Image: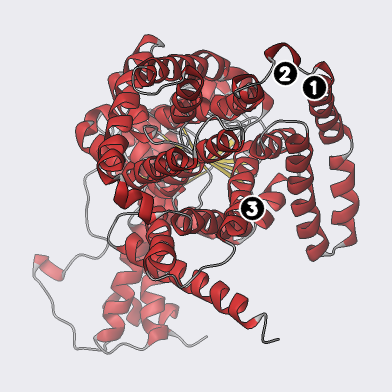
Amino acid sequence: MAETAPLFLEILLILGGGIVAGTLFKRIGLGTILGYLFAGIVMGPILRLVQHGQDEILHIGELGVVFLLFIIGLELKLSRLWALRRQIFGLGLAQVVVTGGILTAGLSFILPGWNAAVVIGFGLALSSTAFALQLLEESGEINLRFGQTSFSILLFQDLAIVPLLAILPVLAPGTDSTAAFDPWAMARSVGALVALVVVGRYLINPLFRVLANSGAREVMIAAALFVVLASALLMGLAGFSMAMGAFIAGVLLAESSYRHELEANIDPFRGLLLGLFFIAVGLTLDLTVIADYAWIVLLGAPALMAAKAAILYPLCRLFGESHAVALRTSLVLPQGGEFAFVLFSAATASAILDGATGSILVSIVTLSMALTPLADRLARRLVPDEERADEMVEDFSGAEQSDVLMIGFSRFGQMAAQVMLSSGLEMTIIDSSAERIRAAGRFGFRIYFGSGLRRSVLEAAGIRQVKIVAVCTNKPETTNAIVDLIHSEFPNVAIFARSYDRNHSLSLRERGVTFELRETLESALRFGGKTLEALGLEREEAGRIVKDVRRRDAERLALQQARTAGTGSTVLGRGRVSPEPLTKPKDGARVRQPRGAVPAHLANSGENQPT
């Protein structure tokens, strides 16, 4: 027990340091990633509170990247990947080849051997999947245009680590390059990939069906962990990255009916292990080397970021991206990546790099990671607000058969959605405001970008399968246009609509909606009832008055509907009604009733009798 006490103490220190630093940095706006890095540096190289097992902690933390790629895979169906093929295999390939080639050419004038320049150049060309995707997820921007572009580049970089590791034996000094290629190793890699695809497509779904029927939640959690780790291990043994294996497993399960359960089970482990990874990066820094070569590290990290951003921006523009998308992408991917740690470690073991050079490179990559949130903040300032509004990509790959399709997610829609979601209903929500979707995405709402005025968007959102369409848009003219489109193209769908005012209610009724409600009606009645209670009326009496006003308002609205029927009533057109009070003061004069008295129009009716 005495021998394990220091280990438990270090675990507590890591957890406590991560909690404090992550919370603090999140509160001051720098993000949890930088907080975890800072915690690792303070507990490791500075205070030396954690002195054992830094490499083991880093390896365990790398599982966070594995889980992150699995969850990303769950969100992407094969059809969506196929839609991104140009960005993945076009822009992603161009970024790795061009950036790696330019960095290699520049380093060949500084370093004595071309082989070291190749390893360093292409190693630094890779960006941090963990950092970039964590930033995009925290800001709710993973489904924006630039988020999808960044993800595509990162995905190809994960693929690129395989050939980069494969050529190390060729670049190692004193190695016969003709004997370095192993066809059996290549066959094993391809075979493992095919085996994973077959198992994921034909075995995993039946397995989860059996486990779900057992009703044991802990078994489902264990099965989810097993699938992720087994897939990652299989790809790792085959020569691919473990993160790539987890991503493939996620994509294969994206069509599964259990993917939401898998995501919910894996997500806590992903967050915890990803934080551990960043803490471990800080723990493994060699401050002695950084101090001896501080000028190289301090100049090298910004220079690397500037060079990568300067190369990536024109490449994005060349592949048809807008200025805003190209700028955001180039400034969210300028850092070195975690796979560079793997590549440089392997190169050091193969004698391509010496130990001091490896430490300097790791320090440069780490500093570039730490500066990434600042680069992302700079990008947000440089991109005007009006250019951000059109960044969102229409993507309904995660939309499934739902009970309700809600169009519009402003204040009214948000409250109505809370009621429906609390009942366990499945909902698909679409909105045309990128800013609202970004905000809602941070709270876990599954919302899709799209305009309810387009038939193709309504089709993609599953309007033919839903039972009710809830139109909760802000502008009356927009609501009317959506209702007209749905009635024309999907006449069998029930429409519940939010109306702006009385005239808009009449307009919607003339259009034949199933149900309409003025946005302020119930809140105003509730407000008036509470005011009566505060003025001395009994709750039951105030409730009867509110009920009477609601009834008389509904009767008047029905009468006005009958009068304006067929007149072409619109919000601004013919058939508009003028507002008038339900209860008029006698002789036009203002009559004040004693506090707590029953209203005159109820005094002699059955409404004021106890029930």
Q: Secondary structure at mark 2?
A: loop
How far is mark 2 from mark 1, CA to CA?
18 Å
Label whose residue precedes the other's in the sequence (2 or 1):
2
Q: Position of residue 466 (x, y in %)?
A: 64, 38
Disc assigned to residue 180? 2
Find disc 3 in the rendering and name its residue: 425
Find disc 1 in the rendering and name its residue: 190
- The amino acid pointed to by label 1 is Val
Quarter of the image where the N terminus is located: bottom right
Residue at (37%, 43%) from the top-left corner? 436
Q: Secondary structure at mark 3?
A: loop
Mark in front: 2 vs 1: 2
Above or below, 479 against 528 in this view is above
- The amino acid pointed to by label 3 is Leu
**Of residues 419 and 393, the one drawn nearer to the viewer in this rendering:** 393
Above or below, 110 against 221 in this view is above
Residue at (43%, 34%) from the top-left corner? 510
